[in-house]
Amino acid sequence: MLERVAIGEDEPELVPNRDEDQVNLEHILPKNPSDSDWPQFTPEDQRLFVHRIGNLTLLKKGANGRIGNKPWSVKQPILASSELVLTKKAADETDWTKEVIDARQLEMAGLAVQAWPHGFYKGARHLGIDVSAHIQKGARYRCRVRRFRRSL
């Protein structure tokens, strides 16, 4: 659904592929990263960031199996070759960091507002997320990825 919004489809309802034997959910920062491949993430960072939507993308099962827990330098070209816009866009990053995941998280929140506008805005406000800039009635969503610092 978010993929269809990202490409500007006015009334998105198609799912890229429901067949889990063909398309999987890829954790870009792996669930079990090695310290040498992902030195920018402490064990605590890994726990906090691995399951966030900003760290997730769709990928063909075969490609997903090949890249597994490998470093960003291996994953990036595989993601770049994807036919899915959001997966390919993730590969535009020079490195995969906490800040990149945060920014992508905001982008996904904006796309979610477009895909499911009723109730999402209220829920986002309840969580303290300002998504008002992402709501553009009658216009296509233009993604504005903002880098920001998380406050702990």
Image: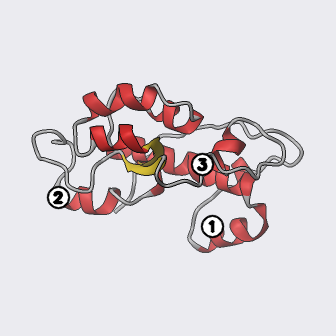
- Residue 17 is left or right of residue 71, and the answer is right
Mark pair 1, 3: CA separation:
27 Å
Residue at the far right: name it: 138
As helix, strand or loop, the secondary structure at mark 2 comes to helix
Position of residue 84 measured from the top left corner of the image (x, y, whole percent): 57, 35
Which amino acid type is shown beneath numbered disc 2? Pro
Q: Residue at x 41, y 29 (%)?
A: 93
Which disc is residue 17 wearing? Answer: 3
Mark pair 3, 2: CA separation:
33 Å
Q: Residue at x 23, y 45 (%)?
A: 69
As helix, strand or loop, the secondary structure at mark 1 comes to helix
Which amino acid type is shown beneath numbered disc 1? Ala
Q: Earlier in the sequence, mark 3 or mark 2?
A: 3
- Residue 78 is left or right of residue 40, and the answer is right
Foreground pick, 63 / 56: 63
As helix, strand or loop, the secondary structure at mark 3 comes to loop
Which disc is residue 43 wearing? Answer: 2
Which disc is residue 124 wearing? Answer: 1
